[in-house]
Amino acid sequence: QVQLVESGGGLVQPGGSLRLSCAASGFTFSRADMSWYRQAPGKERELVAIITSTGGSTTYADSVKGRFTISRDDAKNTVYLQMNSLKPEDTAVYYCNALLRVNLRNYWGQGTQVTVSS
């Protein structure tokens, strides 16, 4: 059974930092492309960052380039999102996503709330 469990969300002031973690189980983590998405109230879910299974290539949304860093630890079956210089517009529920290359199925975590406010 595939499980993705996010953690690390919370309330932070503008300019602050948070690190999100997503612990995965139930599949071969090293063979999955891992992503972070976010959804703000009243808005559609949007892609934040991707890290591929092979070579660890990364891609970021323009809105977070230079501020967020996605990384993965295949030994720990965990993907991270380091978020620096946070802005109020980064406020959203952040979701972890796994795309399994073996069957191209997508799996989602339950989400973690990030609120950027003074």
Image (cartoon, rainbow, N blue to C red):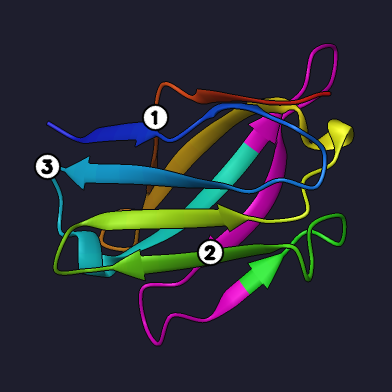
Q: Viewed as shown, does residue 80 lie left or right of 29?
A: right
Q: Amino acid at mark 3?
A: Gly
Which residue matches tag 1?
109
Residue sitting at x 83%, y 23%:
118
Q: Is residue 46 magenta?
A: yes
Measured Cα–Cα span from mark 1 to mark 2: 16 Å
Mark 1 or 2: the one toward you? 2
Q: Is residue 77 rendered to the left or right of residue 84? A: left
- 17 in relation to 59, above or below: above
Q: Residue flagged by tag 1: what amino acid is it?
A: Gly
**Image x and y of residue 109, in percent:** 39, 29
Q: Residues within 10 Å of mark 1 (few under 14, many from 20)?
A: some
Instruction: Return the residue at label 2.
Output: 70
Mark 1 in CB contact with mark 3 (< 8 angstroms): no
Q: Closer to the N terminus: mark 1 or mark 2? A: 2
> Which secondary structure, mark 3?
loop
Magenta highlight range: 38-58
Q: Say what secondary structure mark 2 lies in.
A: strand
Q: Which mark is residue 68?
A: none
At 36% across and 67% down in the image, what residue appears? 72
Q: CA distance from mark 2 to mark 3?
A: 21 Å
Viewer-side residue, 115 vs 71: 115
Give the mark nearest the N terminus, 2 or 3: 3
> What is the C-alpha distance between the residues marked 1 and 3?
13 Å
Residue 26: which numbered mark, if any?
A: 3
Quadrant housing residue 3: top left
**Could you say where residue 15 lies in the image, as x and y percent from the top left?**
80, 47
Picture quarter with the N terminus: top left
Residue at 16% over, 60% down: 76
